[in-house]
Amino acid sequence: MALPPAFEERSAAEQVIGAVVITIVFGLVTGLALGWNEVAYYVLVGPIAIAGGFLGGMEHRGADEGLVRGAMGGLVYGSFILLGLEILNEEPEAYLGEPQAGLVFVTTIAGAYLGALGANYRVRRERALEARAATGG
């Protein structure tokens, strides 16, 4: 699997779109799904969001950078899930617990963890590629 370009090598516009705009839009869509259909919400908040957090972390060259990126992404994502639900003005189809703002804490912590894992994967993969190149393999 090829590694994505490093975050710091991207233009400012690509950084904002990749780290902020996509997260906001995905959070809103997930929040709308939360008000419409429980299964759609769990698909979005489960495997798709987990993959997104890991892949976002893979854009960074250290677990510390990935952790910060993931925490900020999780904070934005969770906040916009609740905003999307509020826009619909519907009761959630899935159980969120009380207070619903607890969702933001969960997405922030999970995002931080996934971002760090993704960045750590990138570090290990880059080392393996460098070692292979150094040995001529």
Image: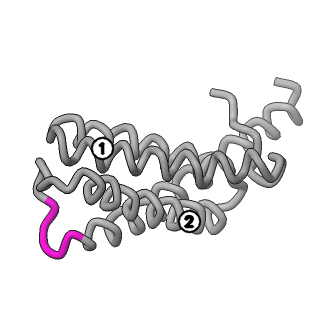
- Which residue, given by chain and number where applicable, does mark 1 sit on? 46
Q: Amino acid at mark 1?
A: Gly
Say which of 45 and 130 sits in front. Answer: 45
Say which of 122 and 52 sits in front. Answer: 52
Residue drawn at x 59%, y 55% is 20
Q: Is residue 125 above or below residue 21?
A: above
Query: Residue 35, image x and y in percent?
Result: 19, 47
Read off the magenta span: 96-100
Alpha carbon distance from label 1 to label 2: 19 Å
Most frequent secondary structure within the magenta stretch: loop
Disc 1 and disc 2 in contact, CB within 8 angstroms: no
For this view, does 108 lie left or right of residue 116? left
Describe the colour scheme in one phrase: one colour
Q: Is residue 101 above or below residue 130?
A: below
Query: Residue 127, image x and y in percent?
Result: 74, 45
Say which of 76 and 113 sits in front. Answer: 76
Magenta segment includes 8: no
- Which residue, given by chain and number where applicable, does mark 2 sit on? 67
